[in-house]
Amino acid sequence: MAEIIGVRFKEVGKIYYFDPNGEKLVKGDRVIVETSRGVECGEVMLDNRDVDDEQIVKPLKMMIRKATQEDLQTVESNLKKENEAFDICLEKIAFHKLDMKLVNVEYTFDGSKILFYFTADGRVDFRDLVKDLASVFRTRIELRQIGVRDEAKMVGGLGICGRPFCCNSHMGEFQPVSIKMAKEQSLSLNPVKISGTCGRLMCCLKHEQETYEHLLRITPKPGAIVDTEEGRGTVVESNVLSGRLKVKLNRNPDAIPATFLKSNVKVVKDAQIKIEREELEALDGLEN
């Protein structure tokens, strides 16, 4: 077991463990810690607690100190510098005629490095840009190419539901989302309807997947052979939320499918939900 505190550096970001260095901290405290990219100021999200060694990425780094008022002023000053650096970088990108979109700028707490985040369709030769920026800011410059999901998380916005993006409002880390999830949730495999503003599959598919997986285990799927009070038939439509099934009866296959509750049928042979190759090709790129 080891005593840790959980620290977050962005409003909605991953929580990292640090050694509290013998101090007692509470949620909301600001602390100065050393990270892989330099000294940073973060917010305590998990107060002092013991965790198993298996949950720790060793070596566990030690907190430097609790943030002082002067430290907090430095953070505010860095925020202003970031806005200025953003405008300067835009000018330099235009000057070098680079096909890239600047998304965000971050100063490390101690000012030893400035990180510029950008998106681009392909590889970008930004070596001259880095040299130009280094001559202006007189510190280490790092340019990081990010994906469209990361851009949405940084910039924020409203989804088609009218609420702030999940990734920007409450998701600390991205969760894998697949076309199979959309298929299992009986959604129309229309790219416009199942993709978010970032152009990738909506993160909310993951939020509901556990419920759908449970319901699918206890609900006959389309194609399943079932016995009903009116005889044997094949499920042609299944609503996992209401538990209602539409069944084409063998004794009268040309008739309109009859409706039954899943509790009133007996599964003879269940079916599998499959994604056709044509569907995968039409949705190529939405998962990445």
Image: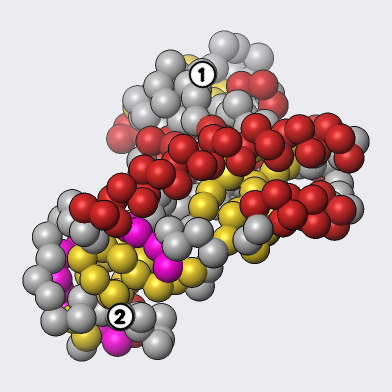
Whole-angstrom CA distance, mark 2 to mark 1, is 43 Å
Q: Amino acid at mark 2?
A: Met
Please give the name of the residue rendered at 60% of the width and 26% of the height, measured from the top-left corner: 197
Please give the name of the residue rendered at 37% of the width and 29% of the height, measured from the top-left corner: 241
State the predominant SS element of the stretch in magenta: strand
Image coordinates for residue 7, horizontal then vertical, percent:
30, 62
Q: Quadrant of residue 265?
A: top left
Q: Amino acid at mark 1?
A: Ile
- Which quadrant: the N terminus? bottom left
Q: Is residue 236 above or below residue 35?
A: above
Residue at disc 1, secondary structure: loop
Please give the name of the residue rendered at 51% of the width and 18% of the height, measured from the top-left corner: 160
Image coordinates for residue 74, horizontal then vertical, percent:
36, 51
Mark 1: few/some/many CA within 10 Å (<14, 14-19, 20+): few
Is 42 a magenta residue? yes
Q: Which residue is more in the foreground, 89 or 261?
A: 89
Q: Is residue 224 left or right of residue 142?
A: left
The residue that disc 1 covers is 160
Mark 2: few/some/many CA within 10 Å (<14, 14-19, 20+): some
Q: Is residue 215 visible?
A: no
Q: Is residue 281 above or below residue 21?
A: above
Is 43 a magenta residue? yes
The residue that disc 2 covers is 62
Residue at disc 2, secondary structure: loop
**Residue located farthest toward the top when viewing the structure as drawn:** 256
Q: Which residue is more in the foreground, 152 or 54?
A: 152
Q: Is residue 33 above or below residue 175?
A: below
Q: Is residue 91 visible?
A: yes
Disc 2 or 1, which lies upstream in sequence? 2
Q: Which residues are magenta?
A: 39-53
